[in-house]
Image (spheres, grey):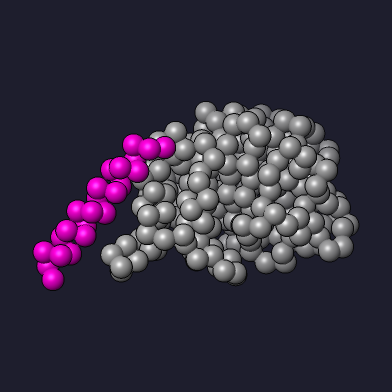
Amino acid sequence: MRPRRGLRWMGQAGALLGVAGLRLSAAVVSQCEVTDGGVVTDTEGRVLAWDTFRGGAAWIPAVTGSPAWGLPALEPGGIAFDAPGDTATPLASAAPSVATLFLVVSPSLPAEGFATLVEVPGASVTAAARAEPPVYDPEDAAGLSVRVNGLPAPGIPDAPHIIEVDFAQPVPGGDLRIGGASACAAWRQPWRGRVVAVVAFGVPPDEPVRRTVRSYLARRHGVAGDFTPAGREAVIQAIALGFHTHGLFSTRFFLK
């Protein structure tokens, strides 16, 4: 059995090398998860930076040096943007550009006002004010492709879920915000919930890779639903693009 296993691992390595040469432009530019200790805080637990794996782009406060803005806070359930006090600044990406964004979020429902999760110039992913049942506002999201747990449904689950956003054109990281609207602190539109994980791609990944990312995020962060990965080749491709699975997909999955 030992020679056969060696051949299989050689095949896996070859597949990784082959995939790496196909779509490196679609590589992961940022992967941040609060469970891995990458959140840098001050002595009061306020977020100064959210570091990524393997030298990717961090997320940093978008607005600094203004008395009207505060900082988000690291709490047991994730990064909170709706803590009492000054309006918390959203976080901006240090990536050159982002085409596709995955987030794991835990909402706090119902929202009395608009609550912005993702913002780019001219569009946002925003929980509509006083909507029953709660929904992501389709008017605010015009021009964006938004999926909830892999489906094009605007409803906001009352549980941790995965938000998947594709931009019509890649967005410079400095123009991308998560956790709130940055135009005016007085609007007080922070995300009312917690942000647990963010994965950003420079180019939209293929659907099999998306399924792998959803499966990983769901398993690691307790998102309920059917998130079966696309298969061995898709996992290998995701890894080759720089996606860190933390060994969540077992050796048996690769070798079967």
Q: Position of residue 58 (x, y in %)?
A: 50, 38
For residue 189, side relative to residue 148 (left or right): right
**Is residue 20 part of the magenta span, yes or no?**
yes
Asked if 241 appears above or below 65 in the picture, the reply is: below
Question: Going 38% across and 38% down the picture, which residue do you hit?
Answer: 22
Q: Nearer the viewer, residue 235 or 46?
A: 235
Q: Quadrant of residue 178?
A: top right
Which segment did they paint magenta? 1-23
Q: Position of residue 170 (x, y in %)?
A: 59, 31
Asked if 161 appears above or below 187 in the picture, the reply is: below
For residue 1, side relative to residue 40 (left or right): left
Q: Can you name the residue that lies furthest to the left here?
A: 3
Asked if 226 appears above or below 102 in the picture, the reply is: below
Q: Nearer the viewer, residue 247 or 89?
A: 247
Question: Going 66% across and 34% down the picture, which residue do you hit?
Answer: 168
Question: Going 64% across and 37% down the picture, which residue do you hit?
Answer: 167
Q: Count the labels in the image.
A: 0
Q: Position of residue 141 (x, y in %)?
A: 76, 42
Q: Position of residue 140 (x, y in %)?
A: 80, 42
Q: Nearer the viewer, residue 83 or 255?
A: 255
**Secondary structure mainly formed by the magenta segment:** helix
User: Which of the image's four quarters has the N terminus?
Assistant: bottom left
Residue 5 in sight in this render: yes
